[in-house]
Amino acid sequence: MVIQSDSASVPLPAGRARRAHVLAALVLAVIFAIDLLTPLGLVVGVLYILPLLMAVELRDRQLLYITAIVAVVLTIVALVIGHNEPSWMVYANRALSVTCIGVCCFLIDRSMDGAIALEAHKREIQVERDKYRSIMAVAQEGIVVADSSSTITDWNAGAERMLGWSRDQMLGQKLSAIMPERFRAAHTAGMARYLESGVPKLIGGVVEVPALCSDGSEIAIELSLATWVQGEQHYFLGILRNIEERKQAEREREQYNLTVQQKNEEMEQFVYIASHDLQEPLRTVSSFAELLQEEYSGQLDSDAETYLKFISQGALRMSALIRGLLEYSALGQTQDVTTIDCNVVLDEVLHDLGVAIREAKAKIDVGDLPTFRAQVSHAEFRLLLQNLISNAIKFRKPDKAPIINISVEPTAYGWQFVVCDNGIGIEEIHQEKIFRIFQRLHSSFVYEGSGIGLSHCKKIVEMLGGRLWVESEPGGGSCFFFTVKAEHSSQFL
């Protein structure tokens, strides 16, 4: 629908204007003939005003002025032709006729301004009504209008689709018809409070409320309210959006999150119990293997000695794996936000790894490190840095001393840490595998360890709201990146 509005006077169509001019000319001719044939004087002069009134109806100023001029001319011509010896009374009548024509022309011109303005105002009102009806018709949301008595005065197709009631059914009904029973008293009290105080509580805002459908069911809607005053009556407009699917999705997500949380808690509890219970039989196996070696030392052949050695080493590795599981399940137990001073944490890590650093002749370059707040403990962040640095020392090239560079850059949401080394590197196909629990790329006889360190790192980084990844190539060293979504962060210290 295309709607145009113009507050100025609208010119008549060409055909209609011509017909109006012809009609005015015919009327003037008739009056002129009467003026010539009858001695009516002033009465005939007043008749010349009749064509002027046609201009009012047609809103045509051009016709008004032309008709007035022609009427004056004809009045004078009738005086000259129709009276051989006109008396002073005739002259006075003609003067009064011309004066009446001029005065009427002026008054009609002034009234025409008001009439044109009124017409323009009516057109503007009609345009606004057409716009309103167009919006009501095409809006997908439900739109409901009610007065201060809560009587519904308008109801669009969107509301009909949403709630099931037609426009004819709802016009004149109370708003309480679409409200669940438990909310009607509150609505009545709120309406009375607003009309008395004029202080809006919900006007201009958005609120989520249930709405009653024609079949008696309830759906969740998002309600936006506006109000205006017309005369002494208050009107309220509500825009209704159906959010039932969104609320259902939220409920399902909450239920899913609750289920996942319960499963995680059950899994952590299972891992802890299972790991704890496995420690005892492992200690038994390890103890009896040691007793066999002590009691029968020198009495067993070389194969038996090798088997006992394998048993002992396997028990030790199994014990290390179980401890790793216990540590992994214990991560994330803290719910408190902690201040992490990375400089202090790194100093502690380097002190703990001092022997390994000296033995490997490792060189460690450290950039400026920040202090931030996050939902991890000091010990957990320390474990993260320790695992990454110890891996850089462990997986070094045999003929080169390790060089480790630690740097940090600010991001839009926190910090990005980078730990780079010049070690043996990692093939691209293994760069995801290394973060899985108990996944090893090398035999424990070549590089010792349980294969759970990077899994610890990944879990800690996820607790920090960040991401852990590696960029590497065989023989070219590795760079481990991880991001921290910090609650509050400082400048570099």
Image (spheres, rainbow, N blue to C red):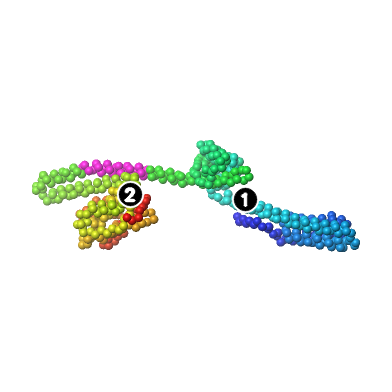
Name which quarter of the figure residue 262 lies in: top left
Q: Residue drawn 80% across and 57% down? A: 99
How far apart, in angstroms, are the residues tagged by discs 2 and 1?
62 Å
Q: Specify whether residue 262 is painted magenta.
A: yes
Q: How many numbered badges does the structure rendering display?
A: 2
Q: Is residue 468 above or below residue 215?
A: below
Q: Amino acid at mark 2?
A: Thr
> Nearer the N terminus, badge 2 or badge 1?
1
Tell us which disc is closer to us: 2 or 1.
2
Q: Which residue is mark 2?
A: 339
Above-or-below relation of 160 to 425: above
Q: Residue furthest right?
A: 85
Left or right: 46 as drawn, with respect to 437: right
Label 1 sits on residue: 129
Instruction: List x then y, in percent, for residue 477.
Output: 27, 61
Residue at the left extreme, as displayed: 298
Q: Quadrant of the C terminus?
A: bottom left
Local secondary structure at mark 2: strand
Q: Is residue 335 left or right of residue 90?
A: left
Q: Which mark is on residue 12?
A: none
Q: Amino acid at mark 1?
A: Arg
Judged by its main secondary structure, the magenta piece is: helix
Q: Residue at x 25, y 52 (%)?
A: 348
Question: In the rendered image of this protein, does residue 446 appear above or below residue 211?
Answer: below
Give me the residue at 53% from left, 41% from top.
213
Coordinates of residue 87 in the picture (x, y in percent): 89, 59
**Where residue 258 appears, x then y in whole percent?**
38, 43
User: Is residue 22 at least partly visible in the picture?
Assistant: no
Residue drawn at 16 percent across, 49 percent down: 309
Quadrant housing residue 412: bottom left
The percent coordinates of residue 60 (x first, y second) are 72, 58
Q: Which residues are magenta?
A: 259-281
